[in-house]
Amino acid sequence: MVKPFSDAAFALNSGEITLKPVKTQFGYHVIYSEGKEDNKKVSFEQAKGQIESALKMDAFRKEVSKRAAALRKDAKISIK
């Protein structure tokens, strides 16, 4: 999270909403706090699925980018 967002979010109590929109580099946000959990360590087994998904998505993005670059290179476009 970017600092202005996290500062506003963590200043809220459970069930509260920001009274003014929070401005960040991504735009304006109205934040509602549903509750907070303490930081806790997650075991590898609990995180394994998310790690696998992230690695697969990264490989997919690289492959799509590589194929798109090849298609652009070989494309012959003419406008009449």
Image (cartoon, helix red, strand yellow):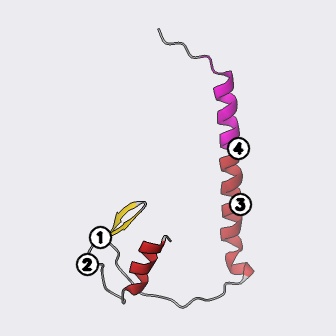
* Residue at the farthest left position: 19
**In contact (CB < 8 Å): disc 3 and disc 2:** no
Q: Is residue 58 left or right of residue 28?
A: right
- Tell me the CA gap for discs 4 and 3: 12 Å
Task: Report the magenta residues as a range.
Answer: 64-76
Hey, what amino acid is under mark 1? Answer: Pro
Question: Which element type, helix, strand or loop, lies under badge 1?
Answer: loop
Residue name at image x 69 percent, y 36 percent: 67
Q: Nearer the viewer, residue 43 or 36?
A: 36
Question: Which element type, helix, strand or loop, lies under badge 2?
Answer: loop
Q: Is residue 71 above or below residue 11?
A: above
Which residue is disc 4 drawn over? 63
Which residue is disc 3 drawn over? 55
**In contact (CB < 8 Å): disc 3 and disc 1:** no
- In the figure, residue 65 lies in which quadrant? top right
- Tell me the CA gap for discs 3 and 1: 35 Å
Q: Is residue 64 above or below residue 35?
A: above
- Tell me the CA gap for discs 2 and 4: 44 Å
Residue name at image x 42 percent, y 73 percent: 4
Mark 2 is surrounded, within 10 Å at the Cα level, by few (under 14), some (14 to 19) or many (20 or more) other residues, namely few
Lower sequence index among marks 3 and 2: 2
- Tell me the CA gap for discs 2 and 1: 7 Å
- Tell me the CA gap for discs 4 and 1: 39 Å
Question: Which element type, helix, strand or loop, lies under badge 3?
Answer: helix
Lower sequence index among marks 4 and 1: 1
